[in-house]
Amino acid sequence: MLDKSIQKETISFAQEIVRVNSPSWHEEGVAVLVEQKMLALGYDSVQIDSFGNVIGIRIGKHPGPVVLFDGHMDVVPATNYDEWTYDPFSGVIKDGKIWGRGATDMKGPLAAVIMAVGYIPAQEIHGTLIVSASVGEEVYEGAGLALVLSEVSPDFVVICEPNDCCISVGQKGRAGLWIEVSGKPAHSSQPHLGENAIYKSVEVIKRLRDMPMPSDDQLGKGIIELVDGISSPYPSLATVPASFRMRYDRRLMPGETVESVLGSIKSALKDLTDWQVGVSEVKIKTYTGKTIEALDFHPGWVIESTSPWIKRAQAGLLESGINAELTIAHYCTNGSQSAGVNNIPTMIFGPSSILLAHIIDEYIEISDLLRGVEGYLGLARSLGDQKN
């Protein structure tokens, strides 16, 4: 069992950061609190980088690898305030739960890992433990973490997303695609003089729905899903649409690239005319004023369940009383950057359920929060000890 003082401090810290509304790219309020907590816990060094990520480092008394634990500070907006039982930024405790936006996704797990890594004695650490409180994950997975990885060069990464304290050994990736179909404008009273771009899009939509998707034995099948579309001109009262631009969410398998994804679409539509396809470009300004420009493409990844890293993780969790099931995450995380782009062995582990993320009346069970601290303590002890 955790010491009562650690339990109390963890709960209080989780409440404190839940009370700060920190939408993507406006995480500075949480960053200040995280920096203060890391310093108070005695991290060997704490810094805020140019993107606004907070990086805390613990140096062990024994040689070993660099292990990075990552949790993001941003939250999705809290909408429909009148439907929330409690103020979404109250952090109130009721019925054994901390209520509020981000309690599960992922300020609770973030508080748990910061406390665990801060409390573990240096003589129990092999190598170096690093905690990154990263920016912008809810909008662009990996945008913040990419800079952290370049700065600290970890040997292994634990993504602290909520997954019921399981070990997730992989996830599908994600790509934001656009497809634009061109027509010919005309007055809608004389539509035969034009070409309605929306009508021309119907066959494109059908082809993409019927397009075969790649698959993986563990991750299942890839997905392509139409999520919105807008005609031009818009709004229009009496003009045949000259173009129709659609956005697709494409869920990716390991090994897929920008070229292979676009190539499959071009092949499916090769005998049609008047269309273009591409990967959406994202332009972001962090709360520090730094601008990030990148393609909205986040690879899928899998780590072998027989990896020594996973075996050490299982052993450490078991010593903490957690018999962690091996699972696959069905959502995209910063692991797309660490594993999918940087090819760094990665796993996901975090308290609470992803089913509580982004919902009205989000909460985290206090028992789950404290279980997360126990789990992170087990991982902090075991992952660096390569003799096990």
Image: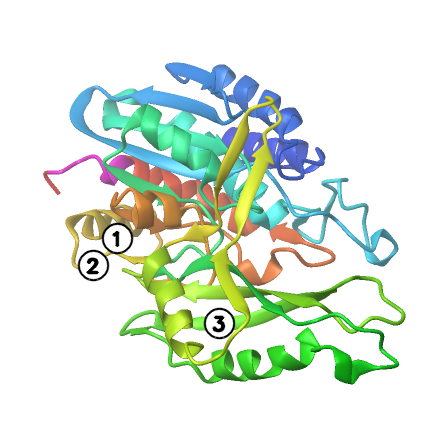
Name the residue rendered at 37%, 56% in the picture: 258
Question: What kind of element bears circle 3?
Answer: strand
Looking at this view, is 25 or 237 the one in front?
237
Name the residue rendered at 88%, 55% in the picture: 82
Question: What kind of element bears circle 1?
Answer: helix
The C terminus lies in quadrant: top left
Marker disc for residue 304: 2
Q: Amino acid at mark 1?
A: Gln
Q: Amino acid at mark 2?
A: Glu
Labels 2 and 3: the sequence-earlier one: 3
Q: Residues within 10 Å of mark 1 (few under 14, many from 20)?
A: many
Please determine whether, in this image, residue 47 is positioned above or below residue 136: above
Pointer 3 residue: 224
Labels 1 and 2: the sequence-earlier one: 2
Question: What kind of element bears circle 2?
Answer: loop
Q: Are marks 2 and 3 in contact (CB under 8 Å)?
A: no
The image shows residue 18 at horizontal and vertical percentages of 67, 38
Pointer 1 residue: 314
Closer to viewer: mark 3 or mark 1: 3
Please determine whether, in this image, residue 26 is positioned above or below residue 311: above
Name the residue rendered at 29%, 42% in the picture: 342
